[in-house]
Image: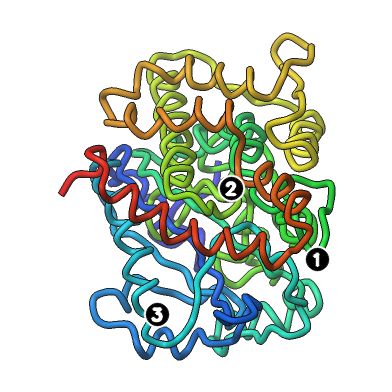
């Protein structure tokens, strides 16, 4: 067993934060493209946005590697509905700042045509370190995502839930796929973002399966002692225990153009975390599937999104990806009403029937024959969909 008090640096106080955490608190993060309104190309105006943002909005905005990107972070909420409203209002507040600066905003997993060589790394200690260490890998990481933080009480329990969440990451990726156009063309991937980021960065993608906090802590401690990392955020896994917040952070999802999609995807991820925690508490075994088989499902999600098929790893057979997502909804149903998720999860069957962002991008590019015209619709829906959600009764005043 690891000496819990002896583990230094990165892990200091982290176990205590998990042991003091509150179950199923919610924080959501989404990233925006900063765009020239005439050309819809990326523009390096992050510092201008931060300078122009009023308080308290400025405290909620953060840099994300490149100067043509800004992230909005909700506060820590005890109800999903409050987090949903915070995220929606945050998008509209950031749009108001962009309007005042003569900028446009868009959300999708990648930008469809702006070259990485035109983007500038922002000047912060963290991102200077990332650029120095990763070079080309950092320069080319022009991606936009949706992250969910969920409070999970107990360090061992949080690690168990994080390990179990590996098994549902492919479904969450397929549902959220929203980056089918890159470099001016249909890439034939539904989530090009997964290829650009997850397949390039070190310590990224699927983590190992850890039995408990001590095993996880020994792994992180080794990375720190050997100089592999100097801060915990250099572990970029698609799901990870967040040391500072005492949360399980789900990081697999593309940024969502449609506000209702962002909230539906986040609600499903929260439902899975809560359902795994309930299974753990009831003594039911949590999934620990083989990494190679999970990678196969990640590939299928990346390539085909909602239009493909996935491996049912418990039965050893294929099934439509839409069926796999429906199975997640059914399995997690007992936590939907208690967590106030039901109104937001109503979006999921609509996405399964009508398609997600990637499917719309593919169809509209084929119809319009113009990548800028396609992205103009993304920009318009980035704003309009948030206005629509704010008017809905599911987002409380």
Task: Name the spot of residue 195 as percent of width and height, x first.
Answer: 78, 54
Residue sitting at x 78%, y 12%: 316
Secondary structure type for disc 2: strand
Task: Name the spot of residue 55 as percent of width and height, x first.
Answer: 24, 80
Q: Residue furthest top?
A: 315
Q: Is residue 327 shown above or below 34?
A: above
Q: CA distance from mark 3 to mark 1?
A: 26 Å
Give the label on residue 184, or none. 1
Task: Name the spot of residue 79 as percent of width and height, x first.
Answer: 24, 41
Q: CA distance from mark 2 to mark 3?
A: 27 Å
> Badge 2, how many Cα within 10 Å: few under 14, some, many 20+?
many
Question: In front here: 129 or 92?
Answer: 92
Q: How is the image coloured?
A: rainbow
On the image, numbered disc 3 is attached to which residue? 99
Task: Name the spot of residue 274 as percent of width and height, x first.
Answer: 39, 29
Cβ–Cβ under 8 Å for marks 3 and 1: no
On the image, numbered disc 2 is attached to which residue? 253
């Amino acid at each position: 067993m690891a000496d819990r008090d002896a583990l230094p640096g990165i892990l200091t106080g982290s176990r205590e934060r998990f042991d003091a955490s509150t179950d199923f608190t919610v924080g959501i993060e989404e990233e925006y493209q900063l765009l020239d309104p005439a050309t819809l190309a990326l523009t390096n105006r992050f510092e201008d946005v931060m300078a122009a943002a009023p308080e308290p909005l400025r405290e909620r905005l953060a840099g994300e590697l490149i100067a043509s990107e800004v992230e909005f972070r909700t506060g820590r909420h005890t109800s999903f509905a409050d987090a949903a409203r915070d995220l929606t209002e945050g998008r509209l507040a950031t749009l108001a700042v962009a309007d005042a600066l003569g900028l446009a905003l868009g959300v999708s997993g990648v930008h469809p045509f702006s070259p990485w060589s035109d983007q500038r790394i922002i000047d912060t200690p963290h991102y200077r370190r990332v650029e120095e260490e990763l070079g080309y890998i950092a320069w080319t990481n022009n991606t936009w995502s949706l992250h969910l933080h969920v409070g999970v009480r107990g360090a061992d329990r949080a690690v168990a839930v994080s390990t179990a969440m590996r098994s549902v990451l492919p479904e969450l990726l397929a549902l959220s796929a929203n980056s089918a156009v890159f470099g001016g063309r249909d890439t034939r991937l539904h989530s090009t973002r997964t290829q650009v980021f997850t397949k390039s960065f070190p310590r990224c993608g699927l983590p190992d399966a850890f039995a408990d906090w001590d095993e996880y802590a020994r792994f992180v401690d080794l990375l720190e002692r050997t100089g592999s990392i100097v801060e915990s955020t250099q572990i970029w896994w698609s799901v990870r225990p967040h040391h500072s917040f005492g949360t399980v952070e789900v990081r697999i999802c593309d940024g969502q153009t449609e506000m209702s999609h962002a909230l539906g995807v986040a609600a499903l991820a929260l439902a899975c975390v809560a359902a795994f925690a309930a299974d753990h508490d009831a003594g039911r075994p949590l999934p620990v599937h083989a990494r190679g088989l999970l990678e196969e499902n990640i590939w299928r999600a990346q390539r085909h999104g909602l239009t493909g098929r996935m491996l049912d790893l418990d039965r050893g057979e294929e099934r439509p990806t839409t069926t796999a997502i429906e199975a997640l909804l059914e399995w997690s149903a007992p936590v939907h009403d208690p967590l106030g998720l039901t109104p937001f999860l109503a979006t999921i069957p609509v996405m399964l029937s009508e398609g997600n962002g990637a499917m719309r991008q593919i169809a509209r590019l084929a119809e319009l024959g113009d990548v800028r015209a396609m992205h103009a619709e993304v920009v318009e829906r980035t704003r309009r969909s948030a206005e629509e959600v704010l008017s809905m009764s599911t987002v409380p005043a």
